[in-house]
Amino acid sequence: MKTKKLLNYILSLGLSLSATNVWAQLSAPNVENVYGGRINAITAVPLGSDSSRVFISTESANSMFYADVHSVTATPTFGSFSVVPGLDASAGFGSGIQIIVGHPASGKVFFGHDMGLMSADINAGTVSVVDSTVGYPNTINIQDDRLIFITGPQLHFGMLDSAGNFTEAGDSPANSFPPLNQPTLCISPLDDSVYVFSQGTTPSLYKLSDTYDGLNAATTGRDISPAALSSSVMWTSFGVAPSGRLFILGSEPSGKYAAHSDDESAWTEYATGIGGAAGRNIAFTGDSSNYKVYWASCYNDQNGNSGYWVGFGNLGQETHPNDGAVFTGVANPGIIYMTTDQGIGASINGGKVIFEIDDGVEAVQVNDMDMTLDKNSAWIASKSGIRHVVDYQTASPLWTTAMFPNGDGSPYYSVAMNPEDSTTVYVGNLRIYKTTDEGASWNQVFSTENAPVSWTGMGVKALALEVCPYDPNTVFAGFEIQDSLAGGLFYSDDGGVSWNQILLEATAPGHDVDVADVVFNLEGSDTVAYVSAIYDLDFPAGRSVYRLVKSGSGWTVARDMDASGTSTGTMLVVTIWDLEVSATGDTIYAAGTDAGTDHPVAYYKALDGTGLWTPLTVSGFPTEMEATAIEVGTDTVYCSVGSDIYYLPVGGTSWSLGYSYPVGTRINFLYWDELLAGSDLGLYAFFNNAATAINGDSNSQLPDGFVLNQNYPNPFNPGTVISYVLPISSQVHLTVYNVLGQQVATLVNADQSAGLHRINFNATTLSTGIYFYRLEAGEFAATQKMVLMK
């Protein structure tokens, strides 16, 4: 990654972490007020005649947030978002909650999960399994205290009481449907009819034989699928307007398409004239004679008729709708909510102007970072835009809102700059953009979509972007393609004006090798670039690390981990995700995954010694995981594996677990110093100061390196994993207690060696409830809470 310099500030961009697992010498991160992230779904419940509570689910380990909105005046007041209790990063529900529906009477929000139909209660601070026998609900709808959802071919239905407790009807479910693809269940506001839509290029549509308040075991679905819709369009969205008109909306590469029917048989199809992808849902405002249709990044204020679709209005490149979920207010019907590239937006004038309401949404997913030598200015590339900070060394660093160069809302994977100049910056998604005025304006300087490269497929990512510190006009960009094709390495020697491909394995320009990282180094009089590759069985077989030496106007390429380049005398066939150059430039480090054993690996190349790639020990590493980042401190090497950071002191013989993020987190980079980690949850920094207290949590800094992790998954049914770290060999007791303090299980009662230990706990014989597990090892003792939901 980038050349790392001293960093002594604490930063968390996107996620506040309540840490329970830290080094004895590290404190937990604090929070910067930088908000946003990718939003999956939006819903709301009324709080009163002029107030509502908005819920959003995110592509983050902070699974769901809520905020209160008040509109006692013409201008609504939008409160700051907070994580829904029980759905934060430590709860382990993950980033995949796609369907959320609010229940007005109780204020609960219902959602689908692998554990079944679930609900969250803000007031009680609880998350509950409503029904664990049904599997993952594919669609959920609530109408007048009636809860309806579909799993597989079955239609489930029942009643919710005022507290949000669900009682399934005695004659539920009804077996009503053939296989459905991401179905949507909608109820007509005109006559209470129920429709079920299945998306696709030849979509299916069913009308139930009973209204929503008359469903029973005999309810069937009558196929009213439109027969003549264009098969070139992916039809993804369905809705029923206040007039009863049926809408099916979708997209193809040329743009968005709409179809509607007033009689369930004759359909009118047309191009909307709006570009971009299709959204998942449709929302409406108005009455049966005059209504607006909201969908993806656009709206129609003429009952959905052809010729009247327009895009949501925005006030600049920092606010841009991104073809995601839409929602119209419940107690505040004049408010329209939509997803944006930065996070969540709103409009109070029907969509003509939108603005961000991201305050408190800690869901930014950070992919890359670069920083000036003086540490006062840094740039962040994330899945939800580009961010810039100045005055970083002061007590009040200033963060910009998210930037989207030229309105490009695709996720950003890389950022690079001359470490002595923060005004000139390159950022990459599948395209490369450049600014020379610190983000005030941007130019697209390269795209793999354009000739002569012409990569038009999905999944193209600029994972690696690097400016040569010895010649800032030299820029490398490395691409991955996430399918059977491979990416490649491109360079510019004139500051991005022109670009050429450097072939690593291929013999002709085009698809070559998936590139993960690039670093530059000065070795004698040679400018050298090290390029890491993602191992690919397909031809050409990219692997390991390549060494490129500047030669005139070009570069000489050699495999650097072949047998002649390793201390073992054997060729290394590995994926290398991250490269690092020591501060003195005399050692190169690499981390990745062994292609044969799927085991994390790390290597170093001592340029002032053998000059050969030498394996670092794998003792202490878990198996069947990837090492995604590596960093070297003054006397310690740090390596991220899965959701954990491990450390290896100079002369050490085994890696030790230093810090654990929520399970499932991918750590995308490490940045010294003292230590900063960028992940798909946010950006975190730690400083070495054993005497510094941890804000709000006196138990977070654990003595002598003992660590008791939060179990995962949590809540669970019936199995979960409890892990802990022992710095020395110890007599270990691991026991489980119920809320009455009664011991219900002994999991470990034995001498155990130092290192990371994982214990599988099966609670089949226990009933639903809260339990505590306690670790005792020598003089150390710690307890954690877990929730069993059956």
Image (cartoon, rainbow, N blue to C red):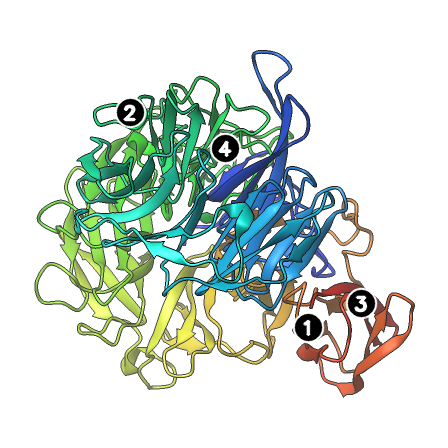
The image quarter containing residue 729 is: bottom right
Which of the two discs, 3 and 1, labels the residue nearer the N terminus?
Answer: 1
Q: Nearer the viewer, residue 284 or 385?
A: 284
Residue 337 lies, in percent from the top left, at: 48, 30
Q: Quadrant of the C terminus?
A: bottom right
Percent across and percent down for residue 223 are 31, 55
Query: Residue 723, which numbered label?
Result: 1
Q: Amino acid at mark 2?
A: Val
> Measured from the top left, where is residue 684 in percent x and y?
58, 48
For image coordinates 64% across by 50% down, the residue present is 159
Q: Is residue 109 above or below residue 350?
A: below
**Residue type for callout 4:** Val
Q: CA distance from mark 1 to mark 2?
A: 53 Å
Q: Nearer the viewer, mark 3 or mark 2?
A: 2
**Residue 389, disc:** 4
Query: What's the residue type where badge 3 is placed?
Result: Tyr
For marks 4 and 2 on the same chain, the one whose residue lies earlier in the sequence? 2
The residue pinned by badge 3 equals 771
The Cα–Cα distance between marks 1 and 4, rounded to whole angstroms, is: 37 Å
**84 or 524: nearer the viewer:** 84
Number of other residues with Cα within 10 Å of mark 2, as a class: few under 14, some 14 to 19, many 20 or more? some
